[in-house]
Amino acid sequence: MIKAVLTGHSRGLGAALAEALLMRGIATLGLARRGNAVLTAQYPQLLHEVAIDLADSAALQAWLDRHVLHDWLAGAERVLLINNAGVVGPVGALEVQAPAQLMQAVALNVTAPLLLAAAFAASSTAERRIVHISSGAAHQPIAGWSFYCASKAALDQHARTVAADATPGLRICSLAPGVIDTDMQAEVRASDPARFPQHARFVAMHETGALLAPAAVAQRLLD
């Protein structure tokens, strides 16, 4: 039996990943602020949801301390964690980034994946797989995206270092899925060009149909 844990399953790539997992008969635990009513109705026996703000590190740790993750993974021969949830902002040069927004974004993009990965690794003796959803921005500096680039680079280095630990039964990777047609891209196009010099490039990608379909990306990631 395979079980999966997926963050940010309510929309975008996360929703597509959830649907792809469920279509394969994989029981999935979705963690997000909002649920996915469509998938819950279609897969009531396979999709289990936890309403949680992953940007609230104290709330996440309190949930992990209840050993719900351990109980969920019990009995599975293979288990999978996909750290998908994330935000692109704050956008803009360093001096205009609001401290409160920056702290919340770091909690969601970096702290939550690392907390979940550590708890996941300790919660099961099954074959464990961890996937961080990263970005090409982890390797390419993009003006206005210092936070986003740094947060994705953190996930990449975390995966490389955990892999170097060579823990038996545990494999981890950080994958950049490409530029996908999601709400995050809509937010990028709605951002202030004065704060994001590459704004026109992302608008053009949308207008020319260059963005990838979430469903196709999800299938490719799971294959």
Image: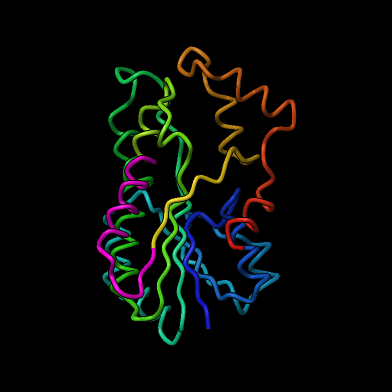
Residue displayed at 34% across by 78% down:
124
Q: Position of residue 33 (x, y in %)?
A: 47, 54
Q: Residue furthest right?
A: 208
Is 212 rendered above or below residue 32? above
Secondary structure mostly taken by the magenta-highlighted segment of the chain = helix
Quadrant location of the C terminus in the rendered image: bottom right
Is 111 rendered above or below residue 74? above
Viewer-proximal residue among 172 and 184: 172
**Total numbered badges shown on the rendered structure:** 0
Residue displayed at 29% across by 38% down:
103
> Which of the 4 image quadrants contains residue 104?
top left
Instruction: Please say which color scheme the image uses.
Output: rainbow
Q: Residue furthest bottom?
A: 75
Residue displayed at 50% across by 45% down:
176
Q: Position of residue 113 (x, y in %)?
A: 36, 54
Q: Position of residue 59 (x, y in %)?
A: 31, 58
Magenta stretch?
A: 152-171
Does 198 appear in magenta?
no
Is 7 rendered above or below residue 104? below
Q: Position of residue 222 (x, y in %)?
A: 59, 62
Is 120 rendered above or below residue 135? below
Q: Residue furthest top?
A: 194
> Which of the 4 image quadrants contains residue 18?
bottom right
Residue displayed at 27% across by 62% down:
61
Does 170 appear in magenta?
yes
Viewer-proximal residue among 116 and 177: 177
Q: Is residue 50 left or right of residue 202?
A: left
